[in-house]
Image: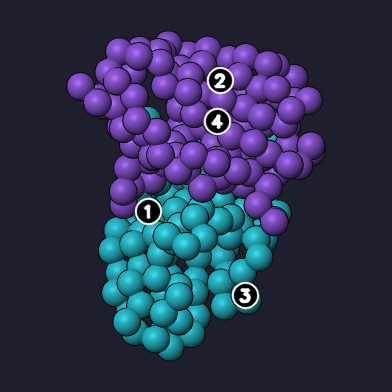
Amino acid sequence: DQQVKQNSPSLSVQEGRISILNCDYTNSMFDYFLWYKKYPAEGPTFLISISSIKDKNEDGRFTVFLNKSAKHLSLHIVPSQPGDSAVYFCAASPPGAQKLVFGQGTRLTINP
Amino acid sequence: KAGVTQTPRYLIKTRGQQVTLSCSPISGHRSVSWYQQTPGQGLQFLFEYFSETQRNKGNFPGRFSGRQFSNSRSEMNVSTLELGDSALYLCASSLSLVGDTQYFGPGTRLTVL
């Protein structure tokens, strides 16, 4: 039972354009959502998070949107840069626990 | 402030052996969680410690165990290693239990031969 799903294994975007990564979840108890960026053989690097009481959070080029009724979140990167090429994981956490449930990841490639 | 550190970074063991991995959280962080990453299963939660107490455990066999010390440093142990235990083991720390971001270490790459 995969509670967090990233249905796109890969995404290719032109440099300077917007990258949109999507994530769906099934457990309505999740109250904290995060996006991480990961390179092979390294630990995930935190990008941005959002609490379930919000529907949008922005940090520089990164914006996360949360649609609770659809159980869907998305990460927007504007403008996309070559250094953004990596695997992106969305993760969700239930209340009162540091127990992240991760999606399978989306490999983002930014083309010059 | 120093990030999460994990030792060793790479480890090669043979089936049947046991292994201990170490994690030092970010200074001031009291919660430590462990994750396993494999190509087939992705990133999966192993266990979570706070104030030396295991708060949650993932769906892993009893061969996987851990502990946390009074200085918040944590170790995980895998006994009777199997080939399928080959993975990247990641440690993450956070300030507390509720709504805090987890910051990950670089991981320990375990290869079981």
User: Which amino acid type corresponds to the residue marked 1 in the rendered image?
Assistant: Gly
Quadrant of the image occupied by residue A19:
top left
Who's purple, chain-wise? Answer: A
- Circle 2 SS class: strand
Q: Is residue B5 left or right of residue B37?
A: left
Chain B colour? cyan
The circle drawn on residue A64 is 2
Q: CA distance from mark 2 to mark 1?
A: 26 Å
Structural crowding at the residue carrying mark 4, measured as other residues with C-alpha within 10 Å and reported as few (<14), some (14–19) or many (≥20): many
Percent position (x, y) of residue A51?
67, 24
The residue pinned by badge 3 equals B61
Q: Is residue A57 above or below residue B56?
A: above
The residue pinned by badge 4 equals A22
Structural crowding at the residue carrying mark 3, measured as other residues with C-alpha within 10 Å and reported as few (<14), some (14–19) or many (≥20): few
Please check whether the numbered discs 3 and 1 fall on a single chain: yes
The residue pinned by badge 1 equals B107
